[in-house]
Image: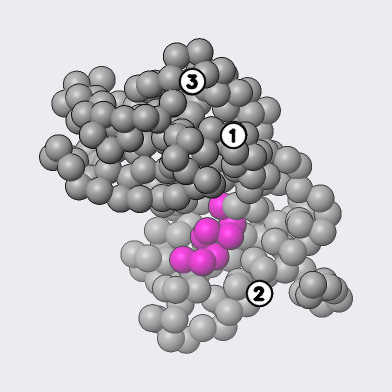
């Protein structure tokens, strides 16, 4: 554990949120995977907040990002985190270091761990079809694009949507930023490697075929590409 980070986090809580009931230190620091550019991610419960807020600071030698909640509402946000499939709050509470809170914090940590182990809700067929259509539409844009700059932005979005599709159709948690690849590797290291290599072929050599093949193989068990006949209410 990075003792300097832990000291800074505790000092920050004492200085800015002395009346909070519970506080967690999460992120890369709690996983002992920090870099020289890591920040301190703090989940803080305080009666001073009616709902929630996200605030950023630079204090005690660290960039600090806080997620501040009313303790009576925290379980509502944990449930929302579960439904979204992207468990930012759940991961901090489940894997984070308790800075303050005693029994209340331990119970919250146990709740978050249980939700993480259970996994996100299963996608229904409408959700699967919407994702198939979105990926198919992006794939057609990618195949037809003759503008290298446009292709980069299309393929970036395609990678994000494909990552979500793979994980959610297997009832796995998704992520953002570095958690995109971490989530894939946690689920299936070989699949993650195939995913990475297919996209690297485009970024390095502008080869489209590896991505096209990978997308088609991913969609195939769910009915393949979906465009013709797709019908989705817009409300």
Q: Residue 102: give x, y in percent of width and height.
A: 45, 14
- Is the residue under label 1 in contact with that under label 3 (CB below 8 Å)? no
Residue drawn where x is 44% and y is 81% of the image: 150
Seen as rendered, the residue at the extreme left is 61
SS category of the residue bearing label 2: helix
Which quadrant of the rendered structure holds the C terminus? Answer: bottom right
**CA distance separating discs 3 and 2:** 45 Å
Q: Residue 113: give x, y in percent of width and height.
A: 57, 23
Q: Is residue 161 magenta?
A: yes
Residue drawn where x is 38% and y is 81% of the image: 149
Q: Classify mark 2: residues with Cα within 10 Å, few (<14), some (14-19) or many (20+).
A: some
Mark positioned earlier in the residue sequence (1 or 2): 1
Q: Nearer the viewer, residue 73 or 133?
A: 73
Seen as rendered, the residue at the extreme bottom is 146
Q: Nearer the viewer, mark 3 or mark 1?
A: 1
Residue that mark 1 sits on:
72
SS category of the residue bearing label 3: helix
Q: Which stretch is magenta?
A: 156-163
Q: Nearer the viewer, mark 1 or mark 2?
A: 1
Q: Quick check: 4 above or below 178? A: above
Q: Classify mark 1: residues with Cα within 10 Å, few (<14), some (14-19) or many (20+).
A: few
Q: Residue 90: give x, y in percent of width and height.
A: 53, 34
Q: Quick check: 126 above or below 48? A: below
- Please give the label number shown on residue 137: 2
SS category of the residue bearing label 1: loop
Occupied quadrant, residue 96: top left
Residue that mark 3 sits on:
105
**Total numbered labels placed on residues in the image:** 3
């Amino acid at each position: 554990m990075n003792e300097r980070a832990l000291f800074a986090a505790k000092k920050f809580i004492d200085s800015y949120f002395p009346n909070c009931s519970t506080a967690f230190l999460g992120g890369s620091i709690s996983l002992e995977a920090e870099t020289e550019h890591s920040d301190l991610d703090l989940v803080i419960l305080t009666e001073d907040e009616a709902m929630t807020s996200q605030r950023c600071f630079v204090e005690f030698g660290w960039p600090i990002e806080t997620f501040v909640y009313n303790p009576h509402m925290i379980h509502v946000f944990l449930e929302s985190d579960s439904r979204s499939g992207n468990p930012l709050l759940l991961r901090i509470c489940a894997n984070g270091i308790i800075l303050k809170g005693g029994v209340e914090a331990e119970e919250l940590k146990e709740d978050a761990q249980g939700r993480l182990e259970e996994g996100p809700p299963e996608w229904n067929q409408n959700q699967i079809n919407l994702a198939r259509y979105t990926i198919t539409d992006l794939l057609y844009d990618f195949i037809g694009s003759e503008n290298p700059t446009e292709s980069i932005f299309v393929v970036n979005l395609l990678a994000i949507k494909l990552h979500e599709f793979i994980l959610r159709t297997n009832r796995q948690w998704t992520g953002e930023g570095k958690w995109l690849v971490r989530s894939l590797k946690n689920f299936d290291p070989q699949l993650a490697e195939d995913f990475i290599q297919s996209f690297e072929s485009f970024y390095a050599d502008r080869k489209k075929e590896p991505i096209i093949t990978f997308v088609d193989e991913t969609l195939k068990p769910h009915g393949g590409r979906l465009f013709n006949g797709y019908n989705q209410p817009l409300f």
